[in-house]
Image (tube, rainbow, N blue to C red):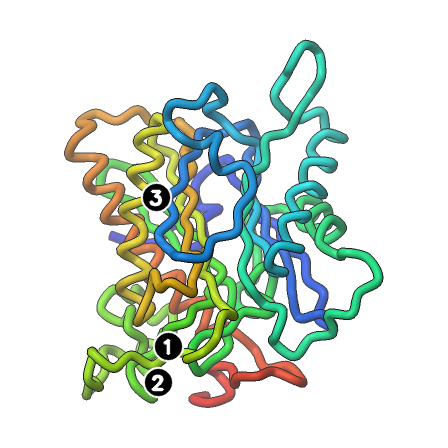
Amino acid sequence: MTPGARNLITDVPGLRVGNAEDFSVKTGVSVLVGDVPFTAGVHVMGGAPGTRETDLLAPDKTVEQVDALVLSGGSAFGLDAASGVADGLRDMGRGFDVGGMTVPIVPGAILFDLLNGGDKGWAENPYKGLGRAALAAAGDQFDLGTVGAGTGATTAQLKGGLGSASVVLPNGVTVGALVAVNALGSAIVGDGPEFWAAPWEVDEEFGGLGVAKAYPDAHLPVTKLGSHQNTTIGIVATDAALTQAQCTRLATAAHDGYARALVPSHTPMDGDLIFAASTGAKPLGEPVSETLMLGHAAAICMARAIARGVHAAVAAPGDPFPAWASRFG
């Protein structure tokens, strides 16, 4: 199987991604928006999540579709990014109609990047503006690495970043992933440079180094010990027609990608979360077997996206950790 044309989550037709950054603060926002509302689900496996509007994504809730999904830095301050996105969507006439009032539905999640060397002495919370700017920048093509919600992200011993990947399945369905990698654990094996996600790499998309030649004791993971500067947040998306319950299952399965690419993952100090999105363009022919394939593909895309995000990060003054490219070239 091969990636889509861009090897990005926007290979799923009808979806766009926008990024906005403040490099002095070392933070940013990423927005996934659909041409039309899309069905969404969510699953949280980390012990320290920060979220907005995730309760309404449960399969028993009334509103089944959303207008956008937001990934943001800033810890709890970053939850305001979704407000900026909602304002921008309302200006476009987008949202759920409630008695003639238009209410954009914008779930979001945040990561902790407040201790990464950036200037956090803002006079006014910058995230609402960053959210609106990210929405305005939404398009089919976008950069990876030190951009958007991955701008200030870190891992155990390297800078994190924004990653994405896609695959086109034999039935013609596309699956994509978008992730801001800000993990307590490590994306590389031991001292590197090889990635834990290496077995699933496609076309040398994160360096083509192959699997590690030697492995450390897996019972002694490399982490930012004593740190609470964590949380990896992501989105998996497909053009397969899924219900809200099936989206929830897709998000759950995609967490395997975190475990394949980050060691350790889902810790008590991470707020690891994945949204899932379905544009509904392609009905499933065999729901049981095809949803199994979708979940597996989503996990692999997520693992690849994590490695791509770390691989693409670039160094900046004041960084607490080196970028992969600076350390390994």
Element on which disc 2 rests: loop
Is 29 above or below relative to 184? above
Q: Residue at x 59, y 68 (%)?
A: 113
Task: Return the residue at label 2.
Answer: 193
Element on which disc 3 rests: helix
* Circle on res. 207: 1
Residue 11 location in percent, x, y? 44, 46
Q: Circle 3: is it few (<14), some (14-19), or many (20+) Cα within 10 Å? A: many
Left or right of residue 77: residue 252: left
Left or right of residue 61: residue 208: left
Residue 322 location in percent, x, y? 52, 85
Left or right of residue 213: residue 145: right
Are the residues at dot 2 and dot 1 in contact (C-beta closer than 8 Å)?
A: yes
- The answer to which of 123 and 66 lies nearer the viewer is 123
Residue type at mark 3 is: Ala
Element on which disc 1 rests: loop
